[in-house]
Amino acid sequence: MNAVFKGIAVIGLILYPFFVGYGLAKGHYAWVSVLLIALGMMRMFSKGNALLWPLTGFAILCGGLSLILKDHAWLKLYPVCMNVGALIIFSMTLIKPPSMIERFARLAEPDLPPEGVHWTRQVTKVWCGFFAVNALIALWTVYFAPMKIWVLYNGFISYVLMGILLLGEYLLRKRQQRLHQAQK
């Protein structure tokens, strides 16, 4: 059942910008606020990785503030908070290793060589930069862009950019590994 809750929460949070766009277009931000709180609670009770708890807290906080203050801007600020939260999480792993990308890399390659550890640390820094820039763009869309642009950026473009960064890092890491093996 835990996996079902996790899956529903992940899918709901990925589709979140579209829910907000639809809800605000119809003038029904309250149900989106409740949905965001519910998704956060589902994630919290599914006992996922403790590193992700700040992201869960942001979901509940933004949804709650939207309801309490009757202000839909908090719903649009959630992607900003997600990026800031991811930036904090990734940055903390640079202070207290292993870095986030090293953790991911070790899932596929448990015996990561020292060069790989260095590589993944540098990539974690790139991700930190990405999250910082993405948070600023998301914030700009909240206050200066029409709703369609907010939905397009936060519900599609930012995911495409993350996918490009993820794929690019993977391809470069494999290239780096081949070059390192050829030097041995």
Image (cartoon, grey):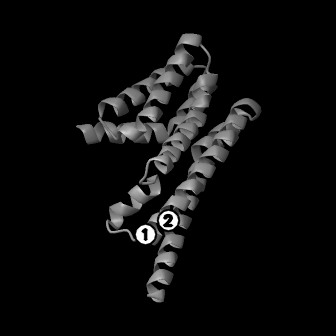
| Nearer to the camera, 164 or 105 | 105
The structure residue drawn at horizontal position 43% and vertical position 87%, both measured from the top left corner, is: 184
**How packed is label 2: few (under 14 Cα within 10 Å), some, or many (20 or more)?**
some
Question: Tag 2: residue type?
Answer: His
Q: Which numbered circle lies on residue 114?
A: 1
Location of mark 2 (residue):
118
Q: Which numbered circle lies on residue 82?
A: none
Query: Would residue 83 be found to the left or right of residue 11 on screen?
Result: right
88 up-or-down from 118: above or below:
above
Real-space Cα distance between discs 1 and 2? 6 Å
Q: Secondary structure at mark 1?
A: helix
Choose top left, top right, bottom left or bottom right for residue 143. top right
44 up-or-down from 136: above or below:
above
**How packed is label 1: few (under 14 Cα within 10 Å), some, or many (20 or more)?**
few
Query: Would residue 176 be found to the left or right of residue 48 on screen?
Result: right
User: Residue 30, image x and y in percent?
Assistant: 52, 18
- Count the labels in the image: 2
| Nearer to the camera, 68 or 109 | 109
Specify the quadrant that holds the N terminus. Answer: top left
Question: Tag 1: residue type?
Answer: Pro
User: Residue 134, image x and y in percent?
Assistant: 64, 45
**CB of mark 1 within 8 Å of CB of mark 2?**
yes
175 up-or-down from 155: above or below:
below
The structure residue drawn at horizontal position 54% and vertical position 17%, both measured from the top left corner, is: 65
The structure residue drawn at horizontal position 52% and vertical position 42%, both measured from the top left corner, is: 86
User: Residue 157, image x and y in percent?
Assistant: 62, 50
73 up-or-down from 116: above or below:
above
Q: Secondary structure at mark 2?
A: helix
